[in-house]
Image: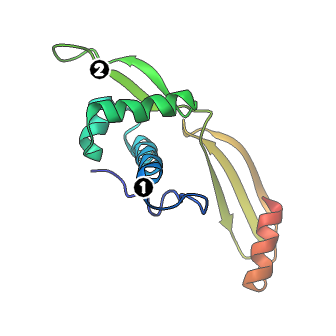
Amino acid sequence: MILSTNSFFSLGQQLEQVGIPYKIELRKKQIIAQLTITAEITINEIASLLGISAPTANELMLSLLKDGLVKDTGKRLEGVGRRATIYKLAEDSYYFLGVEIKKYKLNIGLMGMDKKLIASSLEIPFSFSNAHDSLNAIIDDI
């Protein structure tokens, strides 16, 4: 089952949410979202999950490869017939930023796709006052 991208990625204001360009961007984001869950995927698995043809899935993957967002990790060895190429997210293309908000301090961590902590700032002094001012203070700290 594919992860819904509605809450995972936003398409931004610049894209009109109809037509072919929107569908292409949405499908790319669905592939990326799925790769955050399964780690590795083949063209046929993408086609099956998205309900699209293998050539369309291949075009989407080639676009993501060209943009440096995914990488080819080799061929799947099991099974009969033609060996499928395996794709995964490029480790240096995506990062997760975590912010832990406490009453008097903040903890901030940056993690790569390989789930390794890249950088962190802990015990940053912070005084939670009203929501608007506190949000602006958090943004400034990040």
**Label 2 amino acid?**
Ala
Q: Where in the figure is residue 37, as x and y percent of width and height?
A: 40, 45
In this rendering, would 136 be left or right of 92?
A: right
Viewer-closest of 11 and 73: 11
Residue 63 vertical position relative to residue 130 in the rendered view, above or below: above
User: Seen from this angle, which residue lies furthest front?
Assistant: 19
| Residue identified by numbered label 1 | 19
Residue located at (51% from left, 56% from top): 9
Residue at image point 26% right, 36% down: 53
Residue drawn 79% across the image and 73% down it = 136
The amino acid sitting under disc 1 is: Gly
Disc assigned to residue 84? 2
| The quarter of the displayed image where residue 139 is located | bottom right
Q: Position of residue 124 (x, y in %)?
A: 81, 62
Percent x, y of residue 18 = 43, 60
The crowd level at tag 1 (other Cα within 10 Å; few <14, some 14-19, many 20+) is few
Q: Using the image as rendered, state which of residue 46 and residue 96 is in the foreground.
A: 46
Q: Position of residue 106 (x, y in %)?
A: 74, 65
